Image: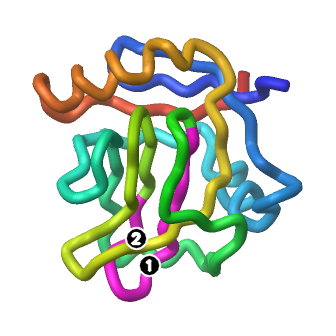
Amino acid sequence: MANLKITAGTYSFKGRFEEKLAPKTCAKFRSLLPYEERIIHVRWSGEACWIPLGELDLGLTYENHTSFPAPGQIIVYPGGISETEILIAYGGVRFASKVGQLAGNHFITITEDLDKLAEMGRSVLWNGAQKFRIELA
């Protein structure tokens, strides 16, 4: 069931919270909706876009975490050895930073228009930062 609208630049996707697998992370982000930021292309992780959040403490620990999110999976790294960040996978990803491999909480899955994810990622890569928004559908 798609209960979220995710907008990245001119691209729009439907998605869902992974509430059974990451209940605390989903509850935190539900409280932040509508969530607006800008995405940029990753530096070390492969085919993904990210939102660097610096020292922001979301009060989260690991749940449903992965280092290899699939296309359409959105993860949040709660901070620790690297900065807090959100990552949106559009292709092959090995989640990492300058300090090495990381794992982030998979808390949203894009469920529709997955065929447009790679196009969105290339747009961010070649055109720079894009507006990003997560809201209830």
Amino acid type assigned to the residue bearing label 1 in the image: Gly
Residue 93 magenta: no
Residue 137 tag number: none
Residue 82 in the image: above or below residue 135: below
Coordinates of residue 98 in the picture (x, y in percent): 19, 74
Q: Earlier in the sequence, mark 1 or mark 2?
A: 1
> Can you say which quadrant of the picture contains the N terminus?
top right
> Can you say which quadrant of the picture contains the C terminus?
top right
Q: Give the range drawn in magenta.
A: 73-85
Residue 79 tag number: 1
Figure disc tally = 2
Amino acid type assigned to the residue bearing label 2 in the image: Thr
Q: Residues within 10 Å of mark 2 (few under 14, many from 20)?
A: some
Q: Which residue is drawn at 48% across and 68% down?
A: 77
Residue 84 tag number: 2
Coordinates of residue 105 in the picture (x, y in percent): 61, 63
Q: Which residue is drawn at 74% across and 35% down?
A: 16
Query: Circles 1 and 2: CB distance less than 8 Å?
Result: yes
Q: In this view, does 56 lie to the left or right of 119?
A: right
Q: Which of 12 and 56 is in front in this view?
A: 12
Q: Residue at x 12, y 23 (%)?
A: 127
